[in-house]
Image: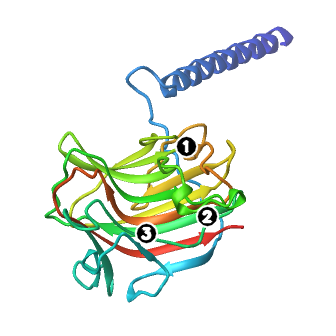
């Protein structure tokens, strides 16, 4: 009887071992099938931009009451700036026009008189629309820029300011038949700086630009941006920030909206702007 029990127990043990072996094989097969294989990969989720900190508005212009003294004309004749409901995003917008043969031949801009200090992090917002009639020449043009101001520590006047390229600018250009915006960044003594973002724009449609900048004389300065809610700056090193110095002197940069272009362009060009806002985080 004891022998029969021993044989019975041994038989059950063998059955259990067989079941365990079959289960282990099945699990191994399942894991291998579920592992990424060539031609059977799952795309990683697209990186997302981190939410920006709260910021306090220091300037807002929606142009429903004109420019309200918040933005000053640069090389503007009365005809170069028009507050209008034509093509308006909501209420009224400002139309800036560069016309050959006038004082606004290659510049029709509005500027702020508020300049951020080194170390400040600032958020800028603006909306713009490029008319359907706009024909882009194959030459440089900017829609917005952040340019150096006189160095107060050296008692400079505007006549003393070196003609450096803006450390941050939004340009427009044609690429393969498409109209694109380009975000340029960095210090340089002439021409334009490196492109850190590019996005297609459609004539006749409003575009919403958001830019966050830490202004600095050192390498800890940065910029990150979106256009129409999508990242405009490139993703690198786990963020959408581009780093580098972005001030030529400690007196800051002035923010300009409007047209600044190659002086040899001989066509009339208009851009509409609305909802300009500047807000500081510190």
Q: Position of residue 189 (x, y in %)?
A: 51, 40
Give x and y (percent) for residue 148. Answer: 55, 56
Q: Nearer the viewer, residue 114 or 125?
A: 114
Residue reaching furthest right?
2
The secondary structure type at the circle numbered 3 is strand
Up-down relation of residue 124 to residue 197 (above or below): below
- Please rate how many residues cluster around mark 3, counting C-alpha atoms within 10 Å: few if below 14, some from 14 to 19, many from 20: many
CA–CA distance in space, label 1 to label 2: 18 Å
Q: Secondary structure at mark 1?
A: loop
Mark 2 packing: few (<14 Cα in 10 Å), some, or many (20+)?
many
Left or right of 128 in this view: 280: right
Mark 3, residue position = 126
Specify which label sits upstream in the sequence, 1 or 3. 3
- Mark 1 residue crowding within 10 angstroms, few (<14) / some (14–19) / many (20+): many
Quarter of the image with the N terminus in it: top right
Residue at position x 45%, y 58% from top?
A: 145
Query: Can you give x and y, in whole percent of width and height, for residue 72 in the image?
Result: 45, 76
Q: Residue at x 37, y 23 (%)?
A: 39
User: Disc 1 or 2, which lies upstream in sequence?
Assistant: 2
Q: Which mark is residue 122?
A: 2
Q: CA distance from mark 2 to mark 3?
A: 13 Å
Which mark lies nearer to you, 1 or 2?
Answer: 1
**Residue 187: image tag:** 1
């Amino acid at each position: 009887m004891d022998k029969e029990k021993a044989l019975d127990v041994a038989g059950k043990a063998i059955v259990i071992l067989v079941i365990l072996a079959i289960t282990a094989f099945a699990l191994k097969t399942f894991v291998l099938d579920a592992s990424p294989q060539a031609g059977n990969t799952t795309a990683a989720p697209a990186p997302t931009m981190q939410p920006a900190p709260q910021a306090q508005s220091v300037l807002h212009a929606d142009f429903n009451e004109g420019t309200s003294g918040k933005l000053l004309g640069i090389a503007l004749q009365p005809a170069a700036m028009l507050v209008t409901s034509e093509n308006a995003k909501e209420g009224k917008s400002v139309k800036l026009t560069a016309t050959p043969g006038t004082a606004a031949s290659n510049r029709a801009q509005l500027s702020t008189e508020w300049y951020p200090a080194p170390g400040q992090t600032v958020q800028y917002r603006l909306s713009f629309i490029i008319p359907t009639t706009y024909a882009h020449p194959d030459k440089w043009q900017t829609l917005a820029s952040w340019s150096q101001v006189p160095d107060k520590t050296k008692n400079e006047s505007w006549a003393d300011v070196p003609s450096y390229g803006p450390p941050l600018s939004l340009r427009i250009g044609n690429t393969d038949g498409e109209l694109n915006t380009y975000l340029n960044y960095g210090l340089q003594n002439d021409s334009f700086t490196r492109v850190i973002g590019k996005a297609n724009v459609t004539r006749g449609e409003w575009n919403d630009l958001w830019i966050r900048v830490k202004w600095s004389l050192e390498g800890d300065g940065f910029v990150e941006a979106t256009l129409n809610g999508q990242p405009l700056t490139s993703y690198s090193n786990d963020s959408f920030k581009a780093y580098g110095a972005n001030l030529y002197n400690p007196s800051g940069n002035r923010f300009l909206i409007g047209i600044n272009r190659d002086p040899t362009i001989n066509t009339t060009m208009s851009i509409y702007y609305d909802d300009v806002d500047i807000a500081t985080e510190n």
